[in-house]
Image (cartoon, helix red, strand yellow):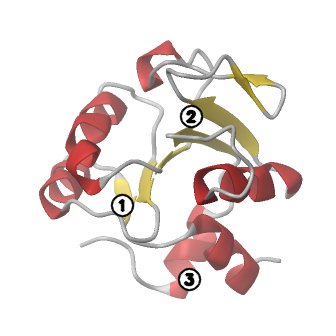
């Protein structure tokens, strides 16, 4: 079952490195403003967007496979129908502890697959909202 409790979410928010799949270079979009908020609050945000060279002054990676740094959390800002493939990419890495889909995004089958592989899953929740509620 995906994480629901405030205590478990608070524990997840203690991780430091967040790869944001679908990170946007356009201010005003949630896929830009949420990772910017996380960056401003001390997280090491790694943008993943094959259509951008740089976001927040950081190199944008084309895919999770291209990220050389260790990743704690994969935060997904892509349509629900793309989640399965992103989860597969995350599961190919040994370092990803948590897969988090943003508000309005979910794939129960992919979530179950990730949990079977020992990963923690949060679905359909905004990291910024949860951070403000539980940490800030």
Residues at marks 3 and 1, CA–CA distance in whole angstroms: 14 Å
Residue 12: quadrant of the picture? bottom right
For the point 63% across and 56% down, which residue is it? 29
Residue 71 shows which numbered tag? 2
Relative vertical location of residue 46 with respect to residue 34 in this rendering, above or below: above
Residues at marks 3 and 2, CA–CA distance in whole angstroms: 22 Å
Task: From the top left corner, tell me how far across and down residue 100 is, in percent.
Answer: 44, 57
* Closest to the observer, 36 or 30: 30
Q: Return the residue at label 3.
A: 7
Tag nearer the camera, 3 or 2: 2
Task: From the top left corner, tell me how far across and down residue 6 is, in percent.
Answer: 54, 85
Is disc 3 placed on a helix, strand or loop?
helix
Residue 55 shows which numbered tag? none
Q: Return the residue at label 1.
A: 121
* Closest to the observer, 94 or 110: 110
Residue 126: quadrant of the picture? bottom right
Task: From the top left corner, tell me how far across and down residue 21 is, in percent.
Answer: 49, 39
Is disc 2 placed on a helix, strand or loop?
loop
Relative vertical location of residue 82 with respect to residue 111 in this rendering, above or below: above
Nearer the N terminus, badge 1 or badge 2?
Answer: 2
Tag nearer the camera, 3 or 1: 1
For the point 49% across and 18% down, which residue is it? 62
Q: Quadrant for the C terminus, please.
A: bottom right
> Crowding near pointer 1: few (<14 within 10 Å), some, many (20+)?
many
For the point 40% across and 28% down, which residue is it? 94
> Crowding near pointer 2: few (<14 within 10 Å), some, many (20+)?
many
Task: From the top left corner, tell me how far across and down residue 2 is, in percent.
Answer: 31, 70
Residues at marks 1 and 2, CA–CA distance in whole angstroms: 15 Å
């Amino acid at each position: 079952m995906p994480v629901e409790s405030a205590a478990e979410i608070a524990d997840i928010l203690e991780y430091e490195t967040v790869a944001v799949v679908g990170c946007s270079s356009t201010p005003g979009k949630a896929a830009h403003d949420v990772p910017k908020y996380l960056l401003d609050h001390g997280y090491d945000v790694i943008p993943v967007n094959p259509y951008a060279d740089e976001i927040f002054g950081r190199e944008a990676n084309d895919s999770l496979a291209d990220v050389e740094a260790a990743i704690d959390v994969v935060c997904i800002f892509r349509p629900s129908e793309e989640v399965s493939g992103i989860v597969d990419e995350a599961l190919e890495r040994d370092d990803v502890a948590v897969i988090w889909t943003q508000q309005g995004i979910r794939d129960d089958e992919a979530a179950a697959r990730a949990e079977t592989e020992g990963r923690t899953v949060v679905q359909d929740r905004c990291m910024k909202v949860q951070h403000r509620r539980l940490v800030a």
